[in-house]
Image (spheres, rainbow, N blue to C red):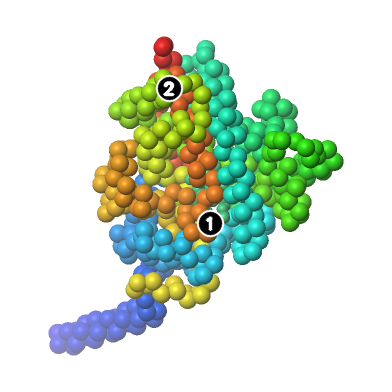
């Protein structure tokens, strides 16, 4: 009897082992595909875990877990597609540098409905090239206009705080950067009624852009699609009006004038370019401004050093110009460190357009690829004490090669220098006039877009000269 039991038990164990091996074998990935979870929720995959909000100066629980289980490159199922997720600097750089050769921008379909199908982030090939060259040409040619506009708007902002000792900084930063874009792109002043209306609609637009992308009447997503239509119509009307009154002898031309003069563009492309720059130009810069103000509040040594730099610049003359900007060495370090620690953009969307072999990995054609920019910024193998805000680390010139906050390759952010310029000039005014403290425990979060739940409340104290 005992022998029978022993045999039966041994038989069962053998049978179970055989069964498990079969299951394991049938689920084993094809050769060289990166490892990843075997069991996925149908359609959704691991999207909800991936999108779970977390503090912006870490990579979030999902990426931490997957990287420790499978390594810096793993496979998953996200946004409805089989996906390779990369937290590896080399692979990220390879993906970004090989746009159009092996990879292509590929944002989920609902984003197309909000941004519009002609948005620069979504189009590829010759259309992308054309739209991008218009943008880059404008940004390069209008650096000086940006300097004088951000200088006067920042001075106004500082003056507006004369009788205040508390403010919601993120909210103020959004207004400041939005009115700057409206001024430089469309020659409109913050006091005009239309920009105020636009600002409201852009807020709705942004909320929907980052919400659950299902079009149910009245929800954030459907409101965003509606807001986009309404802004587009208003911009189309502006184009018509300006076309009828265009002054060919006018010396100073804004972006709208340039778009109208450019015969290779149609009206839909003009509207889309305006929308792209308005949205990208204010949402990102205001986020970075808030991040830097947040980090400086907690780093008295950085604040002090920054103030000394700007005091020295002020002593050399009142005017804020290109020469003054070039002297802001420590300011650049602060901005770069804010980008690295704050992680304004967590990841970008790409798709493999052919089978790609990179090192030991195989990325099959048609798979989505997500380079996680923030992961390399916070990688302890690349940065010493990565979670510490330390602008001095940028004195080591090799640091710049270990980050890519503005993406890379053919799609590297065309507004990167402009965003830095805006922030440097804003900081000049802010640090020369104020000390500040954080009120409460608001901190930067990635939803995955950057936000401060409470709007970043600050207590400010004016510095007497
Ligand atoms: C200041 C902080 C900013 C950050 C961190 C940032 C980040 C990025 C990133 C990571 C991309 C690449 C997206 C991709 O590869 O799919 C990008 C693209 C883009 N950015 Fe920025 N950006 C910033 C400011 C700006 C500003 C100020 C403007 C415009 C005035 C701007 C306009 C654009 C546009 C038009 C694209 C699309 C480029 C293309 O697809 O060719 N950005 N940005």
Of marks 2 and 1, which one's residue comes earlier in the chain? Answer: 2
Where residue 35 appears, as percent x and y from the top left, is 36, 69
**Residue ID for mark 1:** 411
The answer to which of 315 and 51 lies nearer the viewer is: 315
Identified at 67% across, 57% down, the residue is 117
In this rendered view, identify the residue nearer to me: 82 or 120.
120
Outermost residue, left side:
2
* Mark 2 burial class by Cα count in 10 Å: few <14, some 14-19, many 20+: few
Residue 316's disc is 2
Q: Secondary structure at mark 1?
A: helix
Residue 393 or residue 349, whichever sits in front: 393
Residue 376 vertical position relative to residue 160 in the rendered view, above or below: below
Instruction: Find out whether the residues at labels 2 and 1 contact each other: C-beta distance under 8 Å.
Output: no
Q: Going 59% across and 30% down the picture, which residue do you hit?
A: 149
Helix, strand or loop for disc 2? loop
Determine if the C-beta at disc 1 is less than 8 A from ligand 1: yes
Relative placement, left or right, of 270 versus 211 is right
- Residue 219: in sight, yes or no? no
Q: Is residue 422 above or below residue 316?
A: below
Q: Which residue is located at x 49 percent, y 37 percent?
A: 421
Q: Residue at x 46, y 44 (%)?
A: 344
Marks 2 and 1, Cα distance to the nearest angstrom?
38 Å
Q: Nearer the viewer, residue 249 or 168?
A: 249
Residue 442 rendering spot, x and y as whole percentages: 42, 32
């Amino acid at each position: 009897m005992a022998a029978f039991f022993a045999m039966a038990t041994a038989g069962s164990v053998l049978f179970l082992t055989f069964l498990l091996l079969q299951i394991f074998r049938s689920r084993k990935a094809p050769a060289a595909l990166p490892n990843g979870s075997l069991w996925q929720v149908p359609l959704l995959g691991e999207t909800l875990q991936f999108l779970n909000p977390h503090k912006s100066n870490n990579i979030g629980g999902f990426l931490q877990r997957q990287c420790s289980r499978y390594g810096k490159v793993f496979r998953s199922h996200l946004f409805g597609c089989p996906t390779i997720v990369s937290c590896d600097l080399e692979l990220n750089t390879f993906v970004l540098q090989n746009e159009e050769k092996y990879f292509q921008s590929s944002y989920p379909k609902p984003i197309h409905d909000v941004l519009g199908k002609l948005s620069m982030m979504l189009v590829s090939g010759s259309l992308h090239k054309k739209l991008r060259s218009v943008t880059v040409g404008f940004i390069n040619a209008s650096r000086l206009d940006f300097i004088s506009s951000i200088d006067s708007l920042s001075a106004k902002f500082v003056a507006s705080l004369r009788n205040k000792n508390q403010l919601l900084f993120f909210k103020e930063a959004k207004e400041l950067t939005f009115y700057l874009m409206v001024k430089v792109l469309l020659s409109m002043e913050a006091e005009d009624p239309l920009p105020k209306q636009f600002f409201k609609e852009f807020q709705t637009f942004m909320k929907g852009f980052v919400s659950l992308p299902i079009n149910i009447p009245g929800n954030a997503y459907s409101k965003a699609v509606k807001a986009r239509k309404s802004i587009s119509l208003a911009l189309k009307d502006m184009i018509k009006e300006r076309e009828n009154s265009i002054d060919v002898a006018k010396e100073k031309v804004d972006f709208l004038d340039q778009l109208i003069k450019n015969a290779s563009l149609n009206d839909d492309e003009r509207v889309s370019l305006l929308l792209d720059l308005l949205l990208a130009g204010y949402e990102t810069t205001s986020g970075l401004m808030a991040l830097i103000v947040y980090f400086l509040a907690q780093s008295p040594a950085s604040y002090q050093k920054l103030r000394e730099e700007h005091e020295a610049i002020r002593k050399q003359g009142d005017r804020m110009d290109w020469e003054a900007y070039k002297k802001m060495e420590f300011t650049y370090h602060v901005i770069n460190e804010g980008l690295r620690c704050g992680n304004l953009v967590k990841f970008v969307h790409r798709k493999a357009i052919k089978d790609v072999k990179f090192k030991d990995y195989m990325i099959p054609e048609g798979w989505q690829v997500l380079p996680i920019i923030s992961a390399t910024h916070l990688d302890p193998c690349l940065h010493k004490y990565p979670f510490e805000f330390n602008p001095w680390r940028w004195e080591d010139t090799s640091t710049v090669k270990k980050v890519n906050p503005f993406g890379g390759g053919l799609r590297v952010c065309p507004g990167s220098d402009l965003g830095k310029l805006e922030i440097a000039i804003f900081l000049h005014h802010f640090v020369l006039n104020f000390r500040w403290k954080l009120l409460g425990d608001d901190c930067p979060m990635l939803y995955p877009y950057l936000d401060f739940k409470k709007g970043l409340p600050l207590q400010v104290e004016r510095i007497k000269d």
